[in-house]
Amino acid sequence: MATLTVPATIPSVNEDCEQLRKAFSGWGTNEGLIIAILGHRNAEQRKLIRQTYAETYGEDLLKALDKELSDDFERVVLVWTLDPAERDAFLANEATKRWTSSNQVLMEIACTRSANQLLHARQAYHARYKKSLEEDVAHHTTGDFRKLLLPLVCSYRYEGDEVNMTLAKSEAKLLHEKISNKAYNDDDLIRVLATRSKAQINATLNRYKNEYGNDLNKDLKADPKDEFLALLRATVKCLVRPESYFEKVLRLAINRRGTDEGALTRVVTTRAEVDLKIIADEYQRRNSVPLDRAIAKDTHGDYEKMLLALAGHVEA
């Protein structure tokens, strides 16, 4: 369930472009007008605004925004205004450049997008960076991280509800054997996580718990400080309970001594049109605080206003 709110009647795309141009004109920028327009338009509408703005004024809207805005507010507006596939390509490219073993953005994109969305992100990456996502992932990662991430970003999963229960039983046994032997980087274990449909993985994990008494992720906590195991657990969570994964990302981003604006911006911009309402419900259940109130407490100014607009916050 999305949190993005789009007015029942929206102005013409030409009018939106005129208003944005007006927001950039004169003394100072009218940030409120930018939020009122871009913070309440869906992906298709934003794409039309960008096209029309470029045709009308001979300038890419993103460049105009880049000149006028700054800091976290600039980033949230720019990342949000990108087409979803472009946005994923941009975030994935950033993740390869800033790679640390605890960086889970590549896995997050690979595991929480549909097969077609991931394919479109890879195509957008190709168009934007003149090389492939898998090429950069292979180049910038090593060892077990590369072994897991490369097949994840190359995946094109079946998305139907068909489940093979015989396969679920045999693969639950296989996973249990590998985990019991601490063979966490085993080719077959990674193959199951990287290629099976989400419905099939769910069936396998249910069988695993029924047969062996524990959630698979609990058995992957053998060494809490092992960063590859942390990535494996996050992979499983992203595949079967993405709302739980994103809730944790938000909790860590908001509850630190200093806010992790990068993670906060990423989750809000990538999930506002998808399932941010479900994530927000999970956040409130887990933390006893509404997500919009947590955002308002931890951020300020136009950055706060844009995040709240995307999170569907309505002024009382």
Image: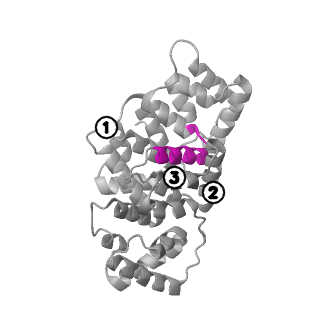
Residue extent of the magenta highlight: 81-97
Q: Which mark is residue 139?
A: 3
Horizontal arrangement in the rendering, residue 46 relative to residue 283 (left or right): right
Prevailing secondary structure of the magenta residues: helix
Q: Give the image location of residue 39, x and y in percent.
A: 53, 36
* Callout 1 secondary element: helix
Give the residue type at disc 1. Answer: Lys
Q: Earlier in the sequence, mark 1 or mark 3?
A: 3
Q: Relative to residue 34, is residue 213 depicted above or below?
A: below
Name the outermost residue toward the top. 27
x 40%, y 65%: residue = 232
Q: Which mark is residue 297?
A: 1
Horizontal arrangement in the rendering, residue 234 relative to residue 36 (left or right): left
Q: Which mark is residue 119?
A: 2
Q: Give the image location of residue 5, x and y in percent.
A: 54, 43
260 or 34, nearer to the observer: 260
x 35%, y 64%: residue = 229
**Which quadrant of the structure image shows residue 295?**
top left
The alpha-carbon separation of the residues under discs 3 and 2 comes to: 20 Å
The alpha-carbon separation of the residues under discs 2 and 1 comes to: 37 Å
Give the residue type at disc 2. Answer: Leu
Q: Earlier in the sequence, mark 2 or mark 1?
A: 2
* Callout 2 secondary element: helix
Q: Give the image location of residue 53, x and y in percent.
A: 68, 29
x 40%, y 34%: residue = 304
**Which quadrant of the structure image shows residue 209?**
bottom left
Q: Give the image location of residue 312, x and y in percent.
A: 47, 43
